Image: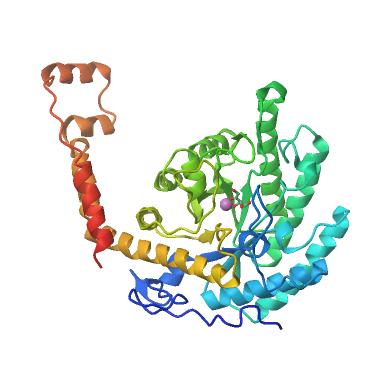
Amino acid sequence: MRTYFPDVPKIPYEGPKTDNPLAFRFYKADEKIGGKTMREHLRFAVAFWHTYQAEGSDPFGRGTAIRPWHDVTDPLDLAKSKMEANFELCGKLGAPFFCFHDRDIAPEADTLSQTNCNLDAIVRYTKDLMKDSDVKLLWGTTNAFSHPRFVHGASTSPNADVFAFAAAQVKKAMEVTKELGGQNYVFWGGREGYETLLNTDMGLELDNLARFLRLAVDYAKEIGFTGQFLIEPKPKEPTKHQYDFDAATVVGFLTKYGLDKYFKLNIEANHATLAAHTFQHDLAVARLNGMLGSIDANQGDPMLGWDTDQFPTNLYDTTLAMLEVLKDGGFKKGGLNFDAKVRRGSFEPVDLFLGHIAGMDAFAKGLRTAYRIQQDGKLDAFVAKRYDSWTKGIGKEILDGRVGFKELEAYALEHDQVRNVSGRQEWLESLLNAYLTEG
Ligand code: XUL
Ligand code: CO
């Protein structure tokens, strides 16, 4: 088999002081943190679409990427080359997983049945590559948004034929994900949303989205797919208003349609910030609803209003994210998928490694810091003390359901000189900085 990155060795851990760009500063896969190795905690995955499909084009210019598979012209051979490169890249990085859309890994043909044949061929090839590798599939998904047939959405299209086509596509992608041992299956609402209510029956579209998800649940049972179903919220882009706006919206939607026990959330950092939330906020909403499934690890640019999908390097964010993951007891079937692409100016093949190393190190450092914060317990103790009034007296009576408005009025009449205490936000932010800069 061909080697695609001959100049890149297996990436070693060399510690924070290394000058070697092809080495980890913080990610030491076998180091145990609280009983689990870093590899087990972080469950890193490489995203097929950004790593092997993206060419660095933007609305103002064509792709700039130099890629070692550019000399391959036959579409199926090219798909095989990219899959080979994937196993080489994941292996050298020590990333235990990858993720794909059906159309990333195999080319679409003129008919659905020929497209399915292409997919089958690549899946057979991938299975063979998996035999000689430890790299596994974290999740599969469907691209039901790029082809012009999805112009008005997939399961929320006004055209029932498109709903049927999308169903056929998800059916096949679920079978393929199962075949490759995928641990999750993601639904990201590509064009499930609208541009204007002047031409949109929002009620029917939302009912159809739920209908579609229900059919997917039924089919997973039928074929014995036991992977976790995940929904990935995003507020806008490509549509002006995406139905899966944010974590809270998706939780409410799933609950309304009785689908909540079948789905968890795949929280993407850049999607949370586009919804005007912090990454930590959407992770906390998912966790508090028992639905923190997986993470699409990236970051946006606070100056830009779109999904820039940059490699995550902000330690503040990775630390607070890992704190949420630790509070949730760690990932179960989910992991950290780099839904991130190198910048257009970072066009050399080695940049694919440098981007992933930067992201893996940022999350490894985040994990180390979050673990220290959790062990130290100072932040938890502060929060517990802040809510102390609920552990005794009238607070406890409210929680125990022993008082109503009349009793509360009687209490308030006797205790009307309320005294509050400071939230100490600045001190807490400074404490967080101390954790980030020590150790
Ligand atoms: C798009 C996005 C997708 C999903 C998978 O913003 O994040 O790549 O992660 O369809
Ligand atoms: Co994503």
Left/right of residue 182 with respect to residue 419 in the rendered view: right
Quadrant in the picture for the N terminus: bottom right
* Identity of the residue furthest to the front in this view: 60
Q: How many marks?
A: 0
The front one of 30 and 344 is 344
Q: Quadrant of residue 392?
A: top left
Q: Give the image's coloring scheme.
A: rainbow
The front one of 1 and 207 is 1
The answer to whether one can see residue 147 in this image is yes
Q: Is residue 108 above or below residue 350?
A: above
Q: Is residue 270 above or below residue 139?
A: above
Q: Is residue 226 above or below residue 82?
A: above
| Residue sitting at x 20%, y 38% | 423
Q: Quadrant of residue 181?
A: bottom right
Quadrant in the picture for the C terminus: bottom left
The answer to whether one can see residue 333 in this image is no
Pinpoint residue 129: horizontal percent, then vertical percent: 69, 77
Left/right of residue 143 with respect to residue 430 in the rendered view: right
Pinpoint residue 395: horizontal percent, then vertical percent: 21, 32
| Residue sitting at x 12%, y 28% | 419
